[in-house]
Image (tube, helix red, strand yellow):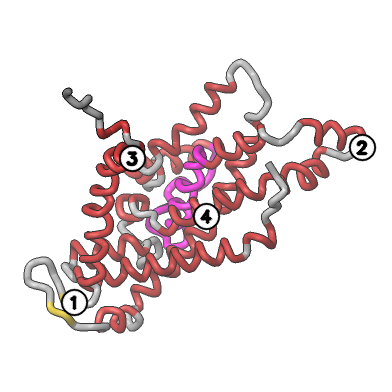
Amino acid sequence: MRKKWKNPLNNEKTAGVCFTMPFTVGFLLFMIVPMGISLYYSFCDYNILSDPSFVGLKNYIKMFQDETFFKALKVTFFYALVSVPLRLIFALLVAMILLRPTKATGIYRALYYLPSIIGGSVAVSILWKRMFAIDGVINKLLGAIGLPSDFSWLGDKNTAIWVLIILAVWQFGSSMLIFLSALKQIPSTLYEASEVDGASSIRRFFSITLPLLTPTIFFNLVMQMINGFLAFNQSYIITQGKPLNSTLFYTVYMYQQSFEYYNTGYGAALAWVMLLLIGLITLALFATRKFWVYDGGV
């Protein structure tokens, strides 16, 4: 008697392996293997055009003797530590405004989210560069209201970094949607009870809304902080790190070393130091989580 054929995919374990195989293979080929190669190159004198030559810790020693490395690190820290809190504050403010349902709420949410989709693109970076040029729309608007209209926003080391920060804050849509979702989960009965007790809107915000949002704030803070340290397009396209390296992001300096100056081994070492820094910052945020995150929230 012929045996009945059994489909191997009917086995839960086999099906799981088959369906996760594309991701597993892709992760190994395009993430783990390149990272391993990069780690090896960080200990080598390598310029793409010749074979790598093992030099031990030479690249890392050179890094801590490099003034431009410290300058890029300082600029990146300033950019991340200023732009991320401003973005989260703005996102929360807009989320609270959009919490009230209206006929056009869906349209408003889509419009506010749009900058997060296109904000990191090359086209928007070029647009931003033109807007803040000497003959750009910003100076035109200032001239229209009688203010000086020939200021070089991108040529002044004191204002160039703020142009990039404003662009980062403008891309608040993803954080806004997360805040909006969290706000909807807060029980309305808490606000009703506080109104009965005579609490003002400010008191309700600091006593109810803000504590219950701290887990969401923590999540947004971690994700946006990582993105802040990995920012690239804004600096590379709009300012190229100028003037006087005042907008030289760490990632741009790493790219320049790897693909413009052909110090690929040094660029790989820079990448691993950045990975270590991001890991330490993330670890510090999680280590301090219990001091300011309210775990009894929704």
The reply, left or right, for residue 224 in relation to residue 297 is left
* Quarter of the image that includes the C terminus: top right
Residue found at the very far left of the displayed protein: 50
Q: Position of residue 41 (x, y in %)?
A: 20, 71
Q: Are marks 3 and 1 in contact (CB under 8 Å)?
A: no
Q: Identify the amino acid type marked 2.
A: Gly
Is 103 located above or below residue 225 in the figure?
A: above
Distance between the alpha carbons at the discs numbered 2 and 3: 56 Å
Q: Position of residue 198 (x, y in %)?
A: 92, 37
The reply, left or right, for residue 224 in relation to residue 22 is right
Residue in the picture at 39% in, 61% down: 247
What is the magenta range? Answer: 145-174
Distance between the alpha carbons at the discs numbered 3 and 1: 40 Å
The disc label shown at residue 98, or none: none
N-terminal of the pair, mark 4 or mark 3, is 3
Distance between the alpha carbons at the discs numbered 2 and 1: 68 Å
**Label 4: which residue?**
222
Q: Are marks 2 and 3 in contact (CB under 8 Å)?
A: no
Quarter location, residue 98: top right
**Label 3: which residue?**
16
Tell which tag, 4 or 3, sits nearer the viewer. Answer: 3
N-terminal of the pair, mark 2 or mark 1, is 1
Tell which tag, 4 or 2, sits nearer the viewer. Answer: 4
**Label 1: which residue?**
44
